[in-house]
Amino acid sequence: MRIIDVIDHTNVMDDEFTYREPQRGSGDWRFGSQVIVGESQVAVFVRGGEALDALSTGRHTLSVANLPLLSNLIGLATSGRTPFTADLYFVNLKDMPQIGWGTNPPIPMETPGKGMGAVLLSTFGTMNISIADPMRFLKKFGIGKPITRVDDIKTAMQTKLLGELTVLLMGSGVQSVPEANGFLGDLEGAVLAKLSEQFENEFGVRITSLDANPFRAKQASPDE
């Protein structure tokens, strides 16, 4: 058994969201061990697959005071003895810029009285995101993984964004491509705020910026 006395995580990759210590197995800790949390980081202790206590930026000496939930579990499992086992996840709170997204499949838009009465709208763009709720993000994507990177969550982000955009666009009542592009023009305003709220509630992620190219329209066929 090797007790972890001092730990930090400074070699953070550009596309990294979470990093587990240790990378393999569970860590052995004691009260008195020190955790150094860098700028734009949060460190979260996990035991039994449950995210428990979080440490903010700074140097922390582990104690009952800063690990109340974990301490309670340790007390129940070990009668208060240390060392104890747990995983420590360093969560990166920095903005992740220029994450690509696109409408695949296209978004249907009704055009009453025109052609088949509907068109399919396609666009693509980029978004910047950051972790707003480390606990929620860990539960959704990080726990059990040595490292979580942008590519690991990209599909979930894309699916969620497309679904929410479709709901908002269809609810806006637009019936032409110019009107739909006007909707895209509000991606820095009310639309962005609604999207970001949905992402934070489900994933613990905040959308800090979102842009899109103008919609391209394709006439819908009878079977689309």
Image (cartoon, rainbow, N blue to C red):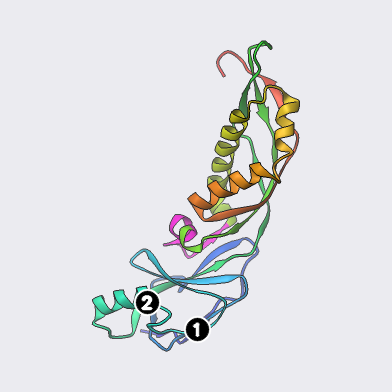
Residue drawn 65% across the image and 64% down it? 14
Residue drawn 48% across the image and 65% down it? 146
**Where in the figure is residue 89, as x and y percent of width and height?**
48, 69
- Which numbered marker is on residue 4? none
- Which numbered marker is on residue 68? 2
Mark found first going from the N terminus, 2 or 1: 1
Residue drawn 63% across the image and 35% down it? 103
Please state the extent of the stretch shown in magenta in the rendering.
Answer: 137-149
- Which numbered marker is on residue 60? 1
**Residue 73 part of the magenta-drawn span:** no
Helix, strand or loop under label 2: helix
Helix, strand or loop under label 1: strand
Location of the N terminus by quadrant is bottom left
- Image quadrant of residue 217? top right
Q: CA distance from mark 2 to mark 1?
A: 14 Å
97 displayed left or right of 22: right
